[in-house]
Amino acid sequence: MADYGLGSWPARRARINGADVALRQHTESGEHSEHGEQSADRSLTYAELAARVEGLSRAFAELGVGHGDRVAYLGPNDIATFEVFFATARLGAIFVPFNTRLAADEIAYLLDDARPTVLVYGPELADLVVAVDPAAHGVAAVVSVAGSGPGSYAALLHAAAGAGVGAAAGHCVVRSEVALSDDAVILYTSGTTGRPKGAVLSHANMTFNTMNQLAHADVLTSDVALCMAPLFHAAGLGQVSLPTLFKGGTVVVAARFDPGYVLSAIAALRIASFSAVPTMLQMLCEHPDFAAADLSSLRFVIYGGSTVAERVAVAWQRRGVPLLQGYGMTEASPGVYLAVPEGAAARPISIGVPHFFTDVSLAAGTDEPEPGTSGELLVRGLNVFRGYWNRPADTDRAFTDGWFRSGDVVRVAEDGWAYVVDRVTDVIISGGENVYPVEVEAVLNALPGVVDAAVVGVADDRWGEVGFAFVIADPDAWTEESLRAALRARLASFKIPKYVRFIPTLPRTATGKVRKQDLRATAATAVGAAGTQPSIEETDRVHSRRHPG
């Protein structure tokens, strides 16, 4: 059986264009990196990457990593992240990247859940690793990316090189022990309810996700892509990064997201593409350097995670940058829908059309959604995972007749392009009427002076549920009363939030999604303290029900 797994990619690519740069770690001029040697401005060709992956895989094997074992990674984006990913896959083991924003107790839970044999960590997280004490959670070896002492990352690679591994980088032997059906990655979901769940993605899932991406957006061998989305999320690996490495382009690895740096890097490095969440796109277009930045090298930008405000999409379009919104989830590696360059500009908030090897349906169960219909999106395909790590009951609940239940309500327009309406769990049922927060948020975000907004439902004695809006806005532009008046001209009365609170920021996950469970808790507390006084909109609703038409 030949090895066509993800771990064979560097060696296979090295046979084609081994002298070309595969990965580049880039830092701003004059910046002192906390990574030391690993994160300084440096690069690896495909031949060098293949050699290091071969050596690191042998080193992991010496540490006891075998087929199906887990290797965890805790650190910011780095060339080392990709090396560990490919080396782990080379062994038929499972790569498990951890969210760097988690606290010690949360990391401890993930270690107990995944039970990795090895933990590789970046120097920025050294104190966190000490606090967690990986050995107490069954980790056999802990490896620091920094330094060169015994047990360090550099020492592992040096020992492998001393043993003659990878001396001829372009001629690495492709192993024959990894099947496409084998598990490759465990990515932990954000855990909006309860503890995070580990979505297990196979080599086939991520390979076909790469094929899906390339079917929608062309990647050239000469392309330079910027990887700034966290590699502990599906978008960091699956969108742009792996497709670029598959095609033999260069991936520039940014350890962190900084709008000023990104704008300068696009010009300096002639970046052709990157993936982002809407918050990043907004921060970039609101940066003072955006108007004058040289963006001419960008061929496309992919974004997802939530819907971007239309004004943000238009701002990028005015700079001549094709903005392609996608829709996906960790469980789909992550792509399900993606806009294509032909037509995206005319539909700035559409998630596009289904991916090539992905099937979609609505809750009605038809194989293809009828134009003009909406419902809960169901997904199946070669990119869709088989289940959650050690959670058979959760896996069973996630599927219906072989279809993965997305939990999102999607509307398919007459032209076949789709739009996310809302989360099934976010829909507010108020007086028997369905209120989709995304619709209300879009109207709020279109108002001048409103920077961002989120709407959640809270319990109400009269209507069952009502809306509670959290708004970031210019304090001189709006009051609660004037904001409601503006909404009244654009929305039916039952859609207008009963409560409005102005806040400085919205709580978000690492992927930029608003943490609505936090907002619901805040709203419930606020409503409980304030009582339930009827609003003008409620009076209007009662009147309209009594006097229809």
Image (spheres, rainbow, N blue to C red):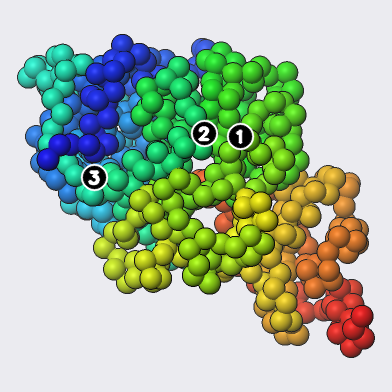
Q: Nearer the viewer, mark 1 or mark 3?
A: 1
| Neighbour tally class for label 1: few under 14, some 14-19, many 20 plus, Cα within 10 Å | some
Closer to the camera in the image, 302 or 469:
302
Relative to 467, 169 lies left or right: left
**Element on which disc 1 rests:** helix
Q: Which residue is mark 2?
A: 217
Relative to 232, 150 lies left or right: left
* x 77%, y 79%: residue: 532
Label whose residue precedes the other's in the sequence (1 or 3) = 3
**Residue 180 marker:** 3
Closer to the camera in the image, 186 or 225:
225
Asked if residue 70 can be seen in this view, the reply is no
Q: Amino acid at mark 2?
A: Ala
Label whose residue precedes the other's in the sequence (2 or 3) = 3
Q: Amino acid at mark 3?
A: Leu
Distance of label 1 from label 3 (alpha carbons): 31 Å
Mark 2 vs 1: CB contact within 8 A = yes
Would you identify the image quadrant in which residue 479 lies? Answer: bottom right
